[in-house]
Image (cartoon, grey):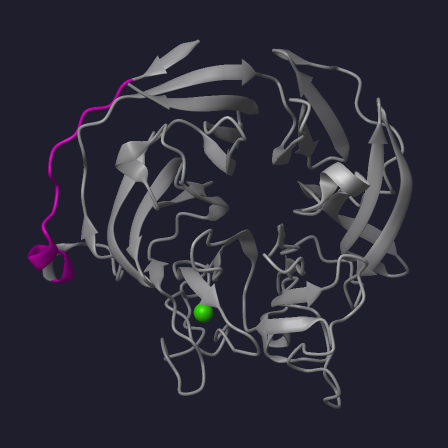
Amino acid sequence: MRYFILSFIIAFTAGLISCTSPADNNSGEEIEQEVQIKVDTLAEGLQNPWGMAFLPDGRILIAERPGNLRIYEDGNLYSEPVDGLPEIWAHGQGGLLDVVLHPQYDDNQWLYFVYAAPGPGGGNTAIGRGKLNDFTLTEFEELFHGYPLSGSGAHFGSRIVFDEQGYLFTTIGDRGQMETAQELTNHHGTVLRMYDDGTVPEDNPFVGQEDALPEIWSYGHRNIQGMIIHPETGDIWTHEHGPKGGDEINVVFKGENYGWPLATHGINYDGSVITPDTTLPGMVDPILHWTPSIAPCGLEIVTSNKYPQWQGNLLVGALAGQHIHRVVIQDREVVETEKLLQGFARFRAIEQGPDGYLYVLTESPGLFFRLRLQ
Ligand SMILES: [Ca+2]
């Protein structure tokens, strides 16, 4: 076990942040609280761990981006990975990404995966499902493969969530071709909605529209690697990577355009301007944006009584930022934010387990651990 004890002071007040903060953001009051965080390391030596899922019997599945699904059970991470996964395209940012249980897992045992899958001309993000039998995935079927395939290693997304009605939502990034995020003829830069068997609901916003793909729920996103259904409101909350600056938190609504690359707070990595506009009519502004970027990945909303100080807060993993960003929200607005475990590692995933504890995956080093408050 290792201990990571932090104590804080008040850093900013609400009245000062807009005129004195060096960061150009709208994140509200930036605060630092007196809190002590204990990190219980459960497993080390993971290779680019990306997603996790909690089985009802207590086992925990960990997806490693190079293409391995690992099993953690009773304090032990099995070295043997699960057999029977589909062909995974571990290419650039692509590979095995998220793993989730079907909402009726107890009845049907379906495990869902989002991953980069290869095909003619390269690959793209795919959704598939299978059933775990000891160390073998059986009955695997691919349900969806993003269009078009390309050789790009950039911006695959992705997460999977199911909403209360059982619809499956997933994300695909702009695949490194920013202008395509505004086109509905491809899956780039989108949130997608489908039934649990991969078919398209008739009430999706672009069904029947010429030159539009029917799975699209929202578009104009750059690269979403965090998505969650708010447990009280049912809203879909996402965050996405900006380029240099302009990382965003959004609430995603049916058929809406989230602006990329026509409206953004970010600029190109070489410093050149992408667009003069940070907001445009007909496009949805972010709830919060980070400039400079923190590179967000992994998103959770705290509901457990294990963390009374963080009730209802968003926790955002930061890769480049190497911290967990705690975001206090009220309705659809940000009240205040705080950086936790700053400098600890690159944070990839955060999830509240069935026992109420928060479980975290980091890379460099590849750790699996549990957070506790003292
Ligand atoms: Ca946006």
Give percent across and percent down for residue 361: 54, 30
Q: Is residue 100 left or right of residue 11?
A: right
Q: Quadrant of the C terminus?
A: top left
Q: Is residue 359 magenta?
A: no
Q: Nearer the viewer, residue 351 or 268?
A: 351
Horizontal and vertical percent for residue 298? 51, 44
In the image, 66 versus 85, the foreground residue is 85
Residue beneath the point at 64% across and 22% down: 58
Q: Is residue 363 visible?
A: no
- Residues shaded magenta: 5-18
- Relative vertical location of residue 2 with respect to residue 249 in this rendering, above or below: above
- Seen in the picture, residue 234 relative to 253 is either above or below; the reply is above
| Quarter location, residue 23 | bottom left
Q: Residue furthest front?
A: 107
Secondary structure mostly seen in magenta is: loop
Whether residue 38 is visible: yes
Residue nearest the observer in this picture, 92 or 82:
82
Q: Quadrant of ligand 1?
A: bottom left
* Residue located farthest toward the bottom when viewing the structure as drawn: 210
Residue beneath the point at 76% across and 50% down: 116
- Which part of the image, by quadrant, shows the N terminus? top left
Please identify the quarter of the rendering in which residue 74 is found. Answer: top right
Number of labels in the image equals 0
Tell me where residue 176 appears, x and y as whole percent. Answer: 63, 63
Q: Residue at x 87, y 42 (%)?
A: 86
> Where residue 132 sits: x, y (%)?
82, 31
Q: Which residue is pictured at 45% across the width and 73% down the height?
A: 274
